[in-house]
Image (cartoon, rainbow, N blue to C red):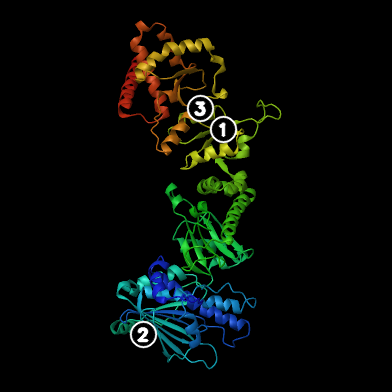
Amino acid sequence: MEYTSGNVSINTENIFPIIKKWLYSEKDIFIREIVSNACDAISKLKKLISVGEADIDSTGWKIEVVLDKEAGTITIKDNGIGMTEEEIVKYINQIAFSGAKDFIEKYEGKTDDSQIIGHFGLGFYSVFMVSDNVQIDTLSWVPGAEAVHWESDTGMDFAISPSDKTDRGTEITLHIAEDSVEFLDSFKLRETLMKYFSFLPVELFFTEIKDEEETEEKETEEKEDAKEEPKPINNTTPLWMKPVKDCTEEEYKAFYHEVFRDFNDPLFWIHLNIDYPFNLKGILYFPKLKDQYDIMEGTIKVYYNQVFVADNIKEIIPEFLMLLRGVIDCPDLPLNVSRSFLQNDGYVNKISTHITKKVADKLTGMFNTEREEYNKCWEDINPFVKYGCLKDEKFYDKVKDVVMFKTTDDRFLTISDLTAIKDGENTEENKPVEKSVYYVDDEVAQAQYVNMLKDAGLDIVIMTGPIDSHFINYIEYKNSGKLKFVRVDSDITDTMKDSSNEMSQEDREKVIADITPSFAKVSGNDKIKIGVEAMKSPLPAIILVSEQSRRMQEMMKMYGGNMNMGADDITVTLNSSNTTVKTLVKLIENKEDNCEKIDFLAAHIYDLALLAHKPMDAGAMSAFMERSAKLLDEFACKE
């Protein structure tokens, strides 16, 4: 075989099915590609004017999308740079040759190239996903140029001939195929245009050609009402493109309502405006949550030169910030040929890192200068902040000093506040002290425990959020040896104890040994744990749950384990300062004569402790109510 060499050329018969079926994830992408190309055509001509190569009136730029349902066509018109026959052959007939890229390379350094949207020659061919015939009529801006007509039925063959077009620009007519007639619906087409081009930098007009009967009706209406000038359907100068100093609070709120259809005002926002080391603009909003399920409803809309690309692109938006709402516009995004997904690029990590930094800076800034407002917002923003700390250690390092813990008396404490050594506390010099932070995760069920701790002068922080159990573990890990979270039903502190009624260890052990059989009987649990402690509380007993065992239980459940909370995990702690408990102890000294009274009191003390700990089942509640009624009768008789 003789040695030969040459260039590999793209065979349209091989590549076109890929373009049509696999390149684009959504069928409506065709309208984004064609209107984006029209915007590019105008941007190119503007640049030629700005560098002095074209002497043309630089006003009146517009793009028109015309729907003719009866004819089955969609036409996209622009008054941009246009094309010569040579350019059509170069940019349309040679698939994957990028006209935008070629233009930027030619004029590099002469002007800003950020407004050229298109990067790939494949975009035009997306029209064949929905069309069975496509026609291009174009007239170049070049003086003396002749208008050109291009036509293709399949995208794999074409015909070029003279065109009767007389005005500068390009007009693309799509004859919509039978399997895509949904785009001939006026509402569907307008909705698609608004999805991608609500903020296109060039005025975009949408027109629907009506049939004769509808036209007559419209003419009659226009005679009755003064005819209005057509209005563009887009806003060419979205708020994120304005300098921060020129934006008002009312504008930020109005923009939020418009884009996210949320009638509630946002809590606050971050306006991003970065020129170096990359070009990025946008606004991130912290929404006010209606309930915990709102946490999952964030949306970050990503734009590319004011053209919508996608929601929540995970490569550039840190995962925890997807819980927010906002818009980001970044012409430096390294999109792939479908303009929908990011290629692997160093810019991506830089953008993500910078966005995270800006959010952290905003939070710390508010904490330092608007502390009262920051406290008011905390209940709404804490899920974002906590989730961010769990997902990104660098974010935690930036915001750890402004993480707040709300107490049951509506105070807000930082980690520094929780770990601070108070006057009178016993400490050894140069030795860290681990502080116990008491928390509640069910304010109703744990109310009695909260009251006991508050009466003892202790702070109780509220940790009732869906990720708070994970957050507690993380904060303990990051502050190892400094603090330990303890649920209110896990421990009796020294300040809760009644020193005037304190029992000796020997007496305590004797009472426990004597009284345990009675509680085992009434509870039906022969492994029940009983404790005795003199407490400053009106309650005869409380149930304490081992913090370590409970956390292990929760972890096992999270990973699908079968571990059940049993008697080994809880302790019924009797209050030896309580009159009823003292009476019960005396009665047990003479068990044989007081069996009925002992069972009655033990059962009622146990149920009271159980009721303060968690909801009772129907049988236990019924027995408790009957006993309570009997006690009322006896009390009434004494009176």
Q: Earlier in the sequence, mark 1 or mark 3?
A: 3
Q: Residues within 10 Å of mark 1 (few under 14, many from 20)?
A: many
Q: Is residue 87 above or below residue 115?
A: below
Secondary structure of the residue carrying tag 1 is strand
Please identify, in this view, whether the residue under mark 3 or under mark 2 is nearer the observer. 3
| Image coordinates for residue 581, horizontal then vertical, percent | 44, 15
Residue behind mark 3? 452
* Vertical arrangement, residue 448 with respect to residue 521, above or below: below
Q: Which residue is mark 1?
A: 484
Q: Residues within 10 Å of mark 3 (few under 14, many from 20)?
A: many
Question: Front-most of 536 and 546?
Answer: 546
Kind of residue sitting beneath label 2? Lys
Q: CA distance from mark 1 to mark 2?
A: 78 Å
Q: Badge 2 is on which residue?
A: 223
> Residue 504 placed where, x, y %?
54, 11
Rendered residue at 48%/69% (across/down): 337
The disc labelled 3 sits on which kind of residue? Answer: Met
Q: Position of residue 51 (x, y in %)?
A: 63, 82
